[in-house]
């Protein structure tokens, strides 16, 4: 069990990431690549993934099928994009590289080349970054739009609870593996661990490939919790499910609802749905009155997101 201890300041600083983190998804997908348990949502990805062996020879020793993997593989800078994350990884201090690789070696036999990685050799760090980039491009690139839609949809559900009831209400939406028992968030975890936020807040990161919640091993790093995003299958335009939805509420309003797979402004909603700004605003108001959409003013714009009911209607078609 992982127990994350909150103060009032931590609740005020708790937030949900903007979407999928490319390095966390890369690392966690390596777990799923070797996990042959049947899971329909990932079956198509496994069946169509074609990966060159070169990147795997570098990455698999650093990411065992279960248990600890080094924190330096998932720097916070990756939230801004893959290249930002790789640049941060290549700047990891030598003392940290050595410490985390030593921890990995306690239970795993590492290849000889990891000695130069522990020494911070620039050429080895560049080779690691190149392997991560290559694997991400070939294994995750084709599925990245779908991964983004999945994590944004999950984020919208969490933000709806946050806007309506605050951070504690949002933390109650994560069960059963993540339970809020004020002032502690109890997380199903393979080891006993206490994490005290001490005013730093918590970043919650929805992940497509995450099987069970995972946190950074080093408690001194910015606290985050990566958790499995809810897998929702939204109807594709023209599908039978989408046609049923259009029959229920009309083609334009169904398009507006479908465009809300992630939270967005009225202007973004109009662009996604292919309607005018005034039409998007009108349809959002009708959907909001029906309890399917939540709208919150943020500075000079209004942001819309699906409510849990709206997500259920969209999925049911």
Image: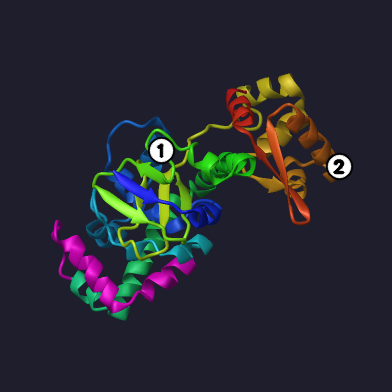
Q: Magenta segment: does it hold 189?
A: no
Nearest-to-viewer mark from 1 and 2: 1
The colour scheme is rainbow
x, y (%) of residue 232?
52, 33
Q: How many marks?
A: 2
The residue under label 1 is 179
Determine the image quadrant of residue 59. bottom left
Residue nearest the observer in this picture, 63 or 129: 63
Q: Are marks 1 and 2 in contact (CB under 8 Å)?
A: no
Mark 1 secondary-structure assignment? strand
x, y (%) of residue 18?
56, 53
Determine the image quadrant of residue 182. top left
**Camera sees residue 51:** no
What span is in magenta? Answer: 83-112
Mark 1 vs mark 2: which is more N-terminal?
1
x, y (%) of residue 121?
27, 80
Q: Residue at x 18, y 67 (%)?
A: 102
Q: Magenta segment: does it hold 88?
A: yes
The residue under label 2 is 278
Q: Residue at x 27, y 72 (%)?
A: 97
**Camera sees residue 119:** yes
């Amino acid at each position: 069990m992982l127990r994350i201890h909150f103060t009032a300041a931590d609740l005020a600083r708790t937030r949900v990431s903007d979407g999928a983190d490319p390095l966390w998804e890369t690392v966690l997908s390596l777990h799923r690549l070797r996990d042959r348990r049947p899971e329909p949502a990932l079956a198509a990805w496994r069946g169509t993934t074609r990966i060159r062996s070169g990147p795997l020879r570098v990455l698999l020793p650093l990411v065992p099928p279960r248990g600890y993997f080094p924190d330096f593989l998932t720097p916070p800078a990756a939230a801004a994009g893959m290249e930002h994350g790789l640049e941060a990884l290549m700047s990891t201090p030598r003392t940290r590289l050595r410490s985390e690789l030593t921890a990995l070696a306690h239970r795993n036999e590492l290849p000889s080349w990891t000695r130069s990685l522990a020494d911070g050799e620039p050429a080895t760090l560049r080779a690691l970054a190149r392997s991560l980039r290559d694997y991400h491009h070939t294994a995750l690139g084709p599925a990245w739009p779908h991964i983004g839609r999945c994590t944004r949809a999950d984020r919208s559900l969490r933000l709806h609870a946050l806007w309506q009831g605050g951070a504690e209400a949002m933390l109650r939406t994560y069960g059963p593996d993540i339970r809020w028992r004020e002032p502690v968030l109890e997380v199903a975890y393979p080891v006993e661990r206490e994490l005290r936020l001490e005013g730093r807040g918590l970043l919650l990161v929805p992940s497509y490939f995450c099987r069970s919640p995972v946190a950074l091993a080093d408690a001194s790093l910015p606290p985050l919790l990566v958790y499995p995003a809810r897998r929702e299958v939204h109807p594709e335009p023209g599908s039978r499910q989408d046609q049923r939805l259009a029959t229920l509420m009309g083609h334009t309003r169904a398009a507006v609802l479908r465009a809300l797979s992630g939270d967005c402004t009225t202007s973004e909603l109009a662009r996604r749905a292919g309607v005018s700004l005034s039409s998007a605003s009108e349809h959002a108001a009708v959907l909001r009155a029906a309890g399917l959409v939540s709208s919150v003013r943020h500075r000079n714009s209004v942001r819309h997101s699906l409510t849990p009911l709206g997500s259920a209607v969209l999925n049911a078609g």
